[in-house]
Image (cartoon, helix red, strand yellow):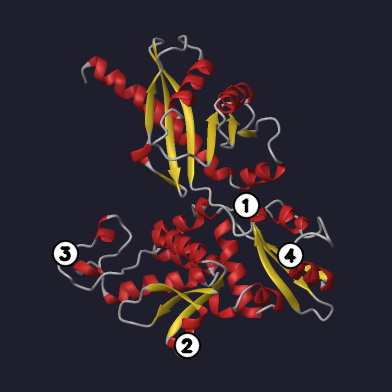
């Protein structure tokens, strides 16, 4: 069983699908079904595992695709133990009703009767409103859609930030808008490979975006039931100017995206020149004096074991429980964890390594940008 995102199915003795589930890490998630049985855990799950004689799984390229595939398989097989898990009228669906300018909406199962057969494309069931909302949020970055009125005279807010193709100001024809919605429908149907092939000819930029989906906002800890979103990630790097001044750079990712309004630069005051460990300790200490700033869900450090140890001590001395890790360039971008880090957290971090590397690189870029800007100021440029 691989340490990758994907979907798994438990089958009964007649090859019937008993249960469909998904995981950020298939190996860890599937193994959890066979721990602490038969006395622990959900009785419904114990019953299902007792009846299962076979298991199948499918690896997906990312976490987002595992949610989409899970929903499509539940819809296809309607497994007994998925339905037992929840009243089918309370499941969540994404609905795109046929219209001149269609737009996705999120609805509960009890609302499906409002959409007669053939009047809408329906995707789901999803297990929570949050999951469906995050899927649409990610999809909209690639396939912008409108929730405004056609030709309303002035551009809507979403048009100004690139999430609306512009029906509000007549910037897109009805035909081209529908083509974009059709691509969104293919995406939600799990037809990613077919869609990439199609877009490679029609819109190479969209095809590239589809290949490199940023879905960190969907990373969850399956052991925590509904899951906990890794919403705020902070990454740190140290930069020097002319061997005299040292700066600590802090960047923030919110929901997997750069949140540049939250970036901060700390001019190091007490650490000796060229002592990166002392500068890093000072940066972290000063950051956590700001109680008014949102607390991070994860701290990423550009560095190896010495840097991780230094930051761990600062966090421990200040009774800060935020998980952290380092990324070592010398170790081919190996993830370095503090002593005692839970294996489940390490596996979650490995599964989301791409976003962690992006954060590390962005911290390095921001630190160097600040150094170059200071140099220009000193030179009068």
- Please, what secondary structure does the residue beneath circle 3 have? loop
For label 3, count other residues whose C-alpha is less than 10 Å away and answer few (under 14), some (14-19) or many (20+). few
Q: Nearer the viewer, residue 19 or 39?
A: 39
Nearest to N terminus: mark 3 or mark 2 = 2
- Please, what secondary structure does the residue beneath circle 4 have? loop
Q: Whole-percent x and y of residue 97?
A: 40, 81
Q: Quadrant of residue 349?
A: top right
For label 2, count other residues whose C-alpha is less than 10 Å away and answer few (under 14), some (14-19) or many (20+). few
Location of mark 1 (residue) = 221
- Please, what secondary structure does the residue beneath circle 2 have? helix
Q: Are marks 3 and 1 in contact (CB under 8 Å)?
A: no
Q: Is residue 341 above or below residue 126?
A: above
Quadrant where the N terminus is found in the figure = bottom right
Location of mark 2 (residue) = 113
Q: CA distance from mark 4 to mark 2?
A: 32 Å
The image's mark for residue 42 is 4
Q: Residue furthest left?
A: 153
The image's mark for residue 10 is none
Q: Whole-percent x and y of residue 186?
A: 49, 72
């Amino acid at each position: 069983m691989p340490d990758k995102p994907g979907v798994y199915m438990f089958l009964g003795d007649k090859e019937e699908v008993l249960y469909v589930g998904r995981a950020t890490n298939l190996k860890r998630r599937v193994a959890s079904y066979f721990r602490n049985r038969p006395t622990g855990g959900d009785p419904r799950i114990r019953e299902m595992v007792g009846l299962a004689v076979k298991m199948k799984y499918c690896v997906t390229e990312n976490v987002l695709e595992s949610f989409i595939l899970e929903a499509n398989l539940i819809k296809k097989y309607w497994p007994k133990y998925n339905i037992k898990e929840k009243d089918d009228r309370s499941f969540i669906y994404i609905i795109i009703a046929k219209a001149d300018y269609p737009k996705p909406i999120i609805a509960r199962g009890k609302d499906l009767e409002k959409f007669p057969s053939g009047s809408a494309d329906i995707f789901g069931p999803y297990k929570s409103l949050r999951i469906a909302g995050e899927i649409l949020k990610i999809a909209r970055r690639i396939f912008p859609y409108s929730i405004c009125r056609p030709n309303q005279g002035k551009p809507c807010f979403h048009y100004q930030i690139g999430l609306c193709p512009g029906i509000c100001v007549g910037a897109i024809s009805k035909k081209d808008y529908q083509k974009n919605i059709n691509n969104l429908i293919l995406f939600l149907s799990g037809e990613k490979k077919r869609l990439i092939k199609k877009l490679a000819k029609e819109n190479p930029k969209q095809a590239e975006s589809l290949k490199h989906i940023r879905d960190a906002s969907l990373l969850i800890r399956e052991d925590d039931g509904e899951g906990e979103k890794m919403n705020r990630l902070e990454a740190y790097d140290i930069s020097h100017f002319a061997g005299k001044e040292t700066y600590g750079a802090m960047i923030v990712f919110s929901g997997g995206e750069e949140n540049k309004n939250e970036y901060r630069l700390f001019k190091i005051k007490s650490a000796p020149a060229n002592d990166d460990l002392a500068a890093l300790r000072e940066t972290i200490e000063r950051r956590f004096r700001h109680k008014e700033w949102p607390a991070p869900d994860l701290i990423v450090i550009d560095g190896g074991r010495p840097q991780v140890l230094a930051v761990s001590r600062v966090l421990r001395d200040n009774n800060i429980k935020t998980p952290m890790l380092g990324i070592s360039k010398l170790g081919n971008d190996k993830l370095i964890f503090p002593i005692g880090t839970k294996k489940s957290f390490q596996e979650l971090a490995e599964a989301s390594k791409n976003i962690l590397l992006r954060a590390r690189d962005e911290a390095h870029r921001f630190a160097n940008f600040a150094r170059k800007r200071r140099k220009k100021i000193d030179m009068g440029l």
